[in-house]
Image (cartoon, rainbow, N blue to C red):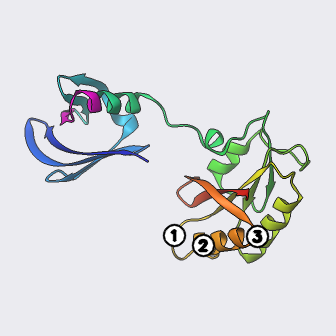
């Protein structure tokens, strides 16, 4: 989750009150200001008195957050977000067994060099669920992994997705699994991690 605060924002010398949100990839101003900036576009990020100050699009922006909160926001901006591989917990030393169609570029990149074809060596399952058959295959594969392992189910975002989040969660819970974490995979896909109860 991101950080959120009511602020007095000064953008290019003009001030107004509103709400600021710091997400993993962007900073958003709402209210009188309606702005969105990618976090990686923010330059010269610093704390001045009680404000977070940065440069973006040749404009100086100040967000009056208070000293402690401004420092926390500055640290968050300076810290790059974790990679998808890190979020999924996969690496060459902690490989995943993969089932389902692997055709999403960010997921392919995250799993590069971090998979195994031997389910007994896998630290987890990464199952790409594109349809009901994919969900059934994920459940079957998960039952074959050693009991201490968990599974990431990767599926399309949005209400039109079938099976969507609700159907996947219901099927996994009915099979005795509990969801414990979720993360965005790409613009198109999201993922939820399940463990055995």
Quarter of the image with the C terminus in it? bottom right
For the residues marked 3 and 1, what is the alpha-carbon distance in whole angstroms?
A: 24 Å
Residue 86, x across and y down, in percent? 63, 38
Residue that appears at 74% across and 70% down: 135
Circle 2 crowding by C-alpha within 10 Å: few under 14, some 14–19, many from 20: some
Left or right of 137 in this view: 52: left
Residue range of the region highlighted in magenta in the rendering: 59-70
Mark whose residue sits in front, 3 or 1: 3
Between discs 3 and 1, the one toward the N terminus: 1
Between discs 2 and 3, the one toward the N terminus: 2
Between discs 1 and 2, the one toward the N terminus: 1
The numbered dot on residue 143 is none
Instruction: Name the residue carrying label 2.
Output: 164
Circle 1 crowding by C-alpha within 10 Å: few under 14, some 14–19, many from 20: few
Residue 101, x across and y down, in percent? 75, 62
Instruction: Name the residue carrying label 1.
Output: 158
């Amino acid at each position: 989750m991101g950080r959120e605060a009511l602020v007095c924002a000064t953008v290019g010398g003009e001030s107004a009150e509103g709400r600021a949100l710091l997400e993993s990839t962007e900073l958003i101003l709402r209210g009188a200001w309606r702005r969105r900036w990618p976090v990686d576009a923010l330059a010269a990020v610093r704390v001045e008195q009680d404000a977070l100050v940065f440069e973006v699009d040749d404009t100086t922006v100040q967000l009056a957050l208070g000293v402690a909160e401004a420092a926390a926001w500055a640290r968050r901006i300076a810290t790059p977000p974790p990679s998808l591989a890190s979020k999924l917990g996969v690496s060459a030393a902690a490989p995943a067994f993969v089932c389902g169609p692997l055709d999403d570029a960010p997921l392919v990149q995250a799993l590069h060099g971090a998979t195994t074809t031997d389910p007994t060596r896998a630290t987890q399952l990464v199952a790409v669920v594109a349809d009901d058959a994919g969900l059934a295959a994920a459940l079957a594969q998960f039952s074959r992994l050693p009991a201490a392992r968990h599974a990431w189910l990767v599926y399309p975002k949005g209400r039109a997705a079938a099976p969507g989040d609700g159907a996947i969660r219901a099927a996994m819970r009915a099979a005795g699994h509990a969801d414990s974490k979720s993360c965005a995979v790409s613009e198109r896909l999201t993922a939820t991690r399940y463990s055995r109860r």
